[in-house]
Image (cartoon, rainbow, N blue to C red):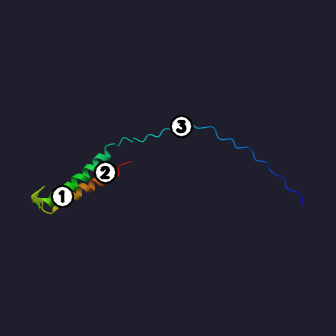
Amino acid sequence: MPKSRIRKKDDFTPPPSAKQTSIKLSSGRSWVAPLMLTMFLIGLAWIVCFYVTEGDLPIKSMGNWNIVAGFGFIAVGFGVSTQWK
């Protein structure tokens, strides 16, 4: 049986090096993280203050709706977090 021809592969030559591209990480939304954390902390402080003072603070006339207000601040913090890149 005849022997098949052996194909010789060309030597590997690396592609020319491309220019290094710098990635800009700053997207101009540096306000998002501080505002998000501030909303979380205000909401947490609101709820803790309500429980520690047994309903006298922060707003006595709101009664148990103070819990809703505290969780509202926390929800706003989560809403702001969607803007984070």
Q: Is residue 27 above or below residue 63?
A: above
Q: Amino acid at mark 1?
A: Val
Q: Amino acid at mark 3?
A: Gln
Q: Position of residue 39 (x, y in %)?
A: 25, 51
- Mark 2 and mark 1: Cα distance apart in space: 22 Å
Identify the secondary structure beneath mark 3: loop
**Mark 1 packing: few (<14 Cα in 10 Å), some, or many (20+)?**
some
State the separation of the CA atoms marked 3 and 2.
34 Å
Residue at (29% x, 50% y) in the render: 36
Q: Quadrant of the N terminus?
A: bottom right
Between residue 49 and residue 75, name the one nearer to us: 49
Decide which of tag 2 and tag 1 comes sooner along the chain.
1
Q: Nearer the viewer, residue 78 or 53?
A: 53
Residue where numbered disc 1 is placed:
48
Q: Residue at x 31, y 54 (%)?
A: 79
Res 61 quadrant in image: bottom left
Tell which circle, 1 or 3, labels the residue nearer the N-terminal end: 3
Q: Which of pointers 3 and 2 indicates the residue nearer the eye? A: 3
Badge 3, how many Cα within 10 Å: few under 14, some, many 20+?
A: few
In percent of the image, x 22 and y 56: which residue is there? 44
How far apart in space, not on screen, are marks 1 and 3 (Cα)? 51 Å
Q: Which mark is residue 20?
A: 3
Q: Amino acid at mark 2?
A: Val
Counting residues from the N terminus, which is met first, the one under dot 3 or under dot 2?
3
Q: Which residue is mark 2?
A: 80
Horizontal and vertical percent for residue 35?
28, 47
Q: Which dot, 2 or 1, sits closer to the camera?
A: 1
